[in-house]
Image: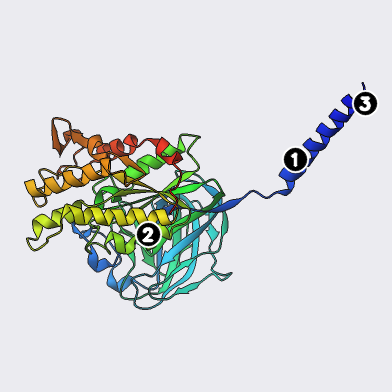
Amino acid sequence: MNRMSFGCIKLALLVILFFSMQAFSSPVQTRWIGTWASSPLHPDRVNDQGKDRATLPHSSRTDITIREVVHVSIGGEKLRVRFSNLDGNSPLIIGVAEIAKTLHNSAIVPATARPLAFHGEPSVSIPAGALAISDPVSFSLLADSDLTVSFYVSGASDYVTEHQLASASSYHVASNVVSNEDLNAPQIMTTWEYLNGIDVLAPSKAAAIATIGDSITDGAYSTADANHRWPDELARRIQTNPKYKRLSVINEAISGNKILMDRAGPNALARFDRDILSQSGVKYLIVLEGINDIGHIQTDPSDTTTASDLIRGLDQMIVRAHTHGIVVIGGTLTPFRGFDRYFSEKTEAIRTTINQWIRTSGAFDAVIDFDAAIRDPNHPDTFLPAYDHGDHLHPNDAGYKAMGDFIDLKLFTLKPCQP
């Protein structure tokens, strides 16, 4: 072996050693990503889908254990939990809280239970209008799985901060039984009370897809406790694809919500900072909103809202999201002929105008044609019967799956627009 060959080998070994040391010494970059979230609203602002909800009785809002089950999108080994007292008029006092893997219904797997802390303390007092994020806790959270959050409320206000249409069962019983394996004869709720979000510590390339919308995104009339909303269907598809499984999906819809007017919760523009821009790790946003604004034009003759008004509202969401480097994807509005309260030739013309703008204006970074996914091709202003819940406004489980399946995952390779 000549000197040159020996020198090349020596140099190669030094390069390998250098990069090996770099890999060993450089910590893996991570950041917090939302894996589940809900949009809170004042309990007095429920809509038709939420009016029959089972919620906390007024007489049972203190000295109770609440146990809520949520379905996450991505997993991780460290997480944190967010509680909200947005609508409270006095402090929400959580005496103790813990997380655990869900066994079934209100039962947990005791060996997996981990206590939550808040600045090192087991309890927290959350001022009226505020929220609290727990300290990070080590927990092996699987993607596409259920997580149970149990907490003891020792003090609360007259007003509960809740998400009205959970399409999932939660539970409450008297006194502090947070650590019990199961709850004895619990009262069932179909709302999420106080629980506002779950974040996981994920690799830096991970990101969240946020969805904002109304009952069609909230999953109205989907099968309870089955997670058949279209964002759930999207999340499941993502987790089966190695190229995209770093992405989470968080659902920030409110049934009955509008772009411009308060009804169920604040209007979408008013809650945009809270429910989208403040969420952890959002890189993509899917917007599917406007049907309730259009319907209100039909139900209230004094409403002079135009298609141009709603387009300007959608454009504001795009501008504000782009300012934060978020890719914004527009969803076309689905048909509603047959839902007599909303439908007329006038409102159909407004829907058609808005959809034409979504498809052709180039204002959105990309478009998901939900309208094309579930309409009857022979009657484009009508749901395909196989996808119709029955009221001609909302999808059934098959319709929600069709919406989730229609989304091209390549959309989630788009780069954020520069503001």
Image mark for residue 154 = none
**Could you tell me which secondary element the residue under label 3 belongs to?**
helix
User: Marks 1/3: CA distance?
Assistant: 24 Å
**How many labels sit on residues?**
3
Question: The C terminus lies in which quarter of the figure?
Answer: bottom left
Q: Quadrant of residue 382?
A: top left
- Seen in the image, is 278 located left or right of residue 287? right
Residue nearest the viewer, comparing 68 with 13: 13
At x 86% / y 32%, what residue is drawn?
10
At x 15% / y 42%, what residue is drawn?
390
At x 39% / y 55%, what residue is drawn?
321
Q: Is residue 120 above or below residue 378?
A: below
Residue at mark 1:
19
Upstream in sequence: badge 1 or badge 2: 1
Residue at mark 3:
3
Within-10-Å neighbours for mark 3: few <14, some 14–19, many 20+: few
Residue at mark 2:
275
Q: Is residue 210 above or below residue 61?
A: above
Q: Amino acid at mark 1?
A: Phe
Point out the frontmost of discs 1 and 2: 1
Upstream in sequence: badge 1 or badge 3: 3
At x 40% / y 62%, what residue is drawn?
195
